[in-house]
Image (spheres, grey):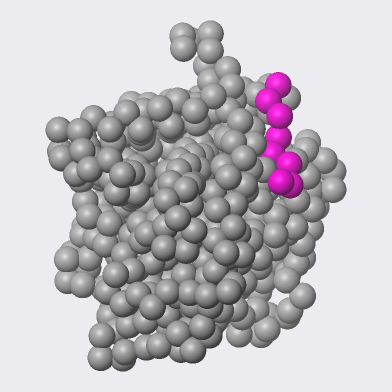
Amino acid sequence: MGEEGMVSDVKNTAKTNPKLTLLPLIALIFYEVSGGPFGVEDSVRAGGGPLLSLLGFLIFPLFWSIPEALVTAELATSFPENGGYVVWISAAFGPFWGFQEGFWKWFSGVMDNALYPVLFLDYLKHSFPIFNRLIARIPALLGITVSLTYLNYRGLHIVGFSAVSLAAFSLCPFVVMGVLSIPRIRPKQWLVVDFKKVDWRGYFNSMFWNLNYWDKASTLAGEVENPSRTFPKALLGAVVLVVLSYLIPLLAGTGALNSAASEWSDGYFAEVGMLIGGFWLKWWIQAAAAMSNLGLFEAEMSSDAFQLLGMSEIGMLPAIFASRSKYGTPTISILCSATGVIFLSWMSFQEIVEFLNFLYSIGMLLEFAAFIKLRIKKPDLHRPYKVPLQTFGVTMLCLPPTFLLVLVMCLASLKTLLVSGAVIILGLFLYPAVVHARDRKWARFDTEEPAVPSCDSLEDQPIVSQQHEEVVDEASVSLLSDPSSSKTEQASELLLEGSLKLE
């Protein structure tokens, strides 16, 4: 991977590397959000029985998943470029808050990705107890992370089609388990709940973690073929797939077996498969779980890396983060994300979930605010897909998920508040540090390109005149200048006009 393999010209890279189409994008969104029922077992234990778990996966998508998916569909098609929500927040509130959003979401994503090598081994250790020992576990975690990072480096289209194959393989055993469980199902067992044993913090964190990250695919918008048409269809397909992938296994497992709620923990679906179908189904589910966690890792790694690339392309990070390999992938950004995964892999499953949920919640509150503000501030913004509601309607649409976000944050432990607070403070100091590095020319920033959404067709973006390109370029160059100067205020205004008023 020498210098000849690295290309900084985004346009040339886009021409030589295939774009994501509908089916691979559905698979990537599926893995960014879910990946299958692996990890939902805790919702039965924390909910004191099957009832709250089943109700949660029926109700939460209506008040959380669908609103977030609709917001993502509108904004991702309005700004079809890498960086996703970072660009939305910058357009609504300026580059400072765009940088904070990017840092929170990237850190949350890396923490999320640290879970999957751990979950991979958690399923395998039921058949290979050696992975309970640190002498085998640590090398295995490192080996898994390095191998999957290399696959991500080889190209996003490979990751996309790999996700399709992994999704099919991972979901098949649960379809079989659902069919085999039908003669044994007792519907009254779905109604079991012991409210005295309900762990509300664990329950809401489990629900939230298994149904969030719908906006992550927006960081890949610049790599999607015809995003204005592909994104809404992909998000709709992914919502249906995610909900069914949770409900069918839970209905089968809790309805066919009379297991105590305390037995439902990570990896328990393998035991459910054995009790319903035999050892062959247990092994199949274990293999599916292992493969699913690989898909989850790849999807999250792609989103995190392309987010850093997008931030670099608009001048928020040094140009080195936008450098691409001969496969079109952001090499340095991938390595940066992989390093974070390795350092965070020592944390427990429950700790990671609570930490990442808190940071993710803060970021989502900012996204909903940006969505509403852009509706008010830029009513004429070119929106290839628009949520069919007026300003009051979209405000009402965002209220239920906002309530859930605040609830998850209020239930956070003191340790989570302290760790998340430290991350937030670090982000506040990082922005002026990056500005200082740019002013002192300690690093090269790629700010000569216009900070406008890239697209593949005229349908996805109106024609931009040469005069308009020059104005946007001026705004892009000044994006990270001294916040106290009047030039920065003018440049920020030019950035908003350049990136939003595309006609």
Q: Where is residue 240 in the image (x, y as percent from the top left)?
A: 66, 65
Residue 358 seen anywhere in this rendered image of the structure: no
Front-most of residues 285 and 144:
285
Q: Which quarter of the figure has residue 263?
A: bottom left
**Quadrant in the rendering for residue 134:** top left
Name which residue lies at 45% across and 85% down: 189
Pinpoint residue 306: horizontal percent, then vertical percent.
52, 39
Residue 394 drawn above or below residue 240 = below
Decide whether residue 42 is among the magenta residues: no
| Count of residue discs | 0
Residue 311: x and y, percent? 49, 42
Residue at image position (21%, 38%) is 130
**Horizontally, is 410 left or right of 213 in the view?**
left
444 over 125 or under it: above or below: above
Question: Where is 8 relative to 248, above or below?
Answer: above
Residue drawn at the location 15% of the way across and 40% of the way down: 133
Q: Where is residue 85 in the image (x, y as percent from the top left)?
A: 54, 55
- The range drawn in magenta is 16-23
